[in-house]
Image (cartoon, rainbow, N blue to C red):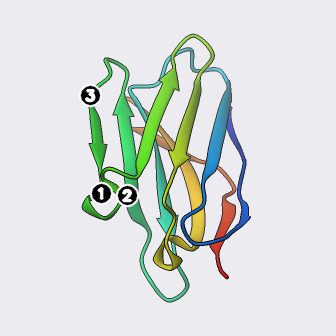
Amino acid sequence: QVQLVESGGGLVLPGGSLRLSCVASGTIVSFNAMGWYRQAPGLERELVARIARGGSINYADSVKGRFTISRDNAKNTVHLQMNSLKFEDTAVYYCNAAFQFSTYWGQGTQVTVSS
């Protein structure tokens, strides 16, 4: 049994910042990869950022230079620092963790960028 619990979403002005956190608990000691996806209304879920256990990182082109993903392997946590937020970053953000052939999802946290 694995649970991913996100926190840190909310309402922010354009140009503002938010920090998302995800804590994984359960039977898996160390995930192969952890990351963040997002889904805006009417659109498909898309990768935002992903970090492997060894530290290699992938970002969506739309967030490069603005978002930073980090991970604490010992605590099974992953964070997403989001700076210079834009209207188009508005979405539900989902924590994701992968182990062998299994993928786990959090319940999602809403991020709204609005003036």
Distance between the alpha carbons at the discs numbered 1 and 3 = 14 Å
Label 2: state its secondary structure: strand
Residue indicated by mark 2: 47
Residue at the extreme bottom of the image, as rendered: 42
Mark nearer the viewer, 2 or 1: 1
Q: Is residue 5 left or right of residue 46?
A: right
Label 1: state its secondary structure: loop
Q: Residue at position x 56%, y 36% from top?
A: 79
Q: Using the image, determine if residue 14 lies above or below residue 53.
A: below
Label 3: state its secondary structure: loop
Distance between the alpha carbons at the discs numbered 2 and 1 = 6 Å
Q: Residue at position x 71%, y 57% from top?
A: 9
Q: Which mark, by number, is residue 60?
A: 1
Tag 1: residue type?
Ala
Q: Quadrant of the N terminus?
A: top right
Residue 45, how many percent across, how many down?
44, 69
Circle 1 Cα neighbour tier, 10 Å, few/some/many (<14 / 14–19 / ≥20): few
Q: Is residue 59 left or right of residue 104?
A: left
Q: Quadrant of the C terminus?
A: bottom right
Asked whether disc 2 touches disc 1, contact meaning CB atoms under 8 Å apart, the reply is yes
Tag 2: residue type?
Leu
Circle 2 Cα neighbour tier, 10 Å, few/some/many (<14 / 14–19 / ≥20): some
Q: Residue at position x 48%, y 49% from top?
A: 36
Out of 115 and 59, give the one closest to the viewer. Answer: 115
Out of 94 and 49, give the one closest to the viewer. Answer: 49
Q: Which mark, by number, is residue 111?
A: none
Tag 3: residue type?
Ser
Q: Is residue 95 left or right of residue 99?
A: right
Residue indicated by mark 3: 56
Circle 3 Cα neighbour tier, 10 Å, few/some/many (<14 / 14–19 / ≥20): few
Residue 43, how many percent across, how many down?
44, 83
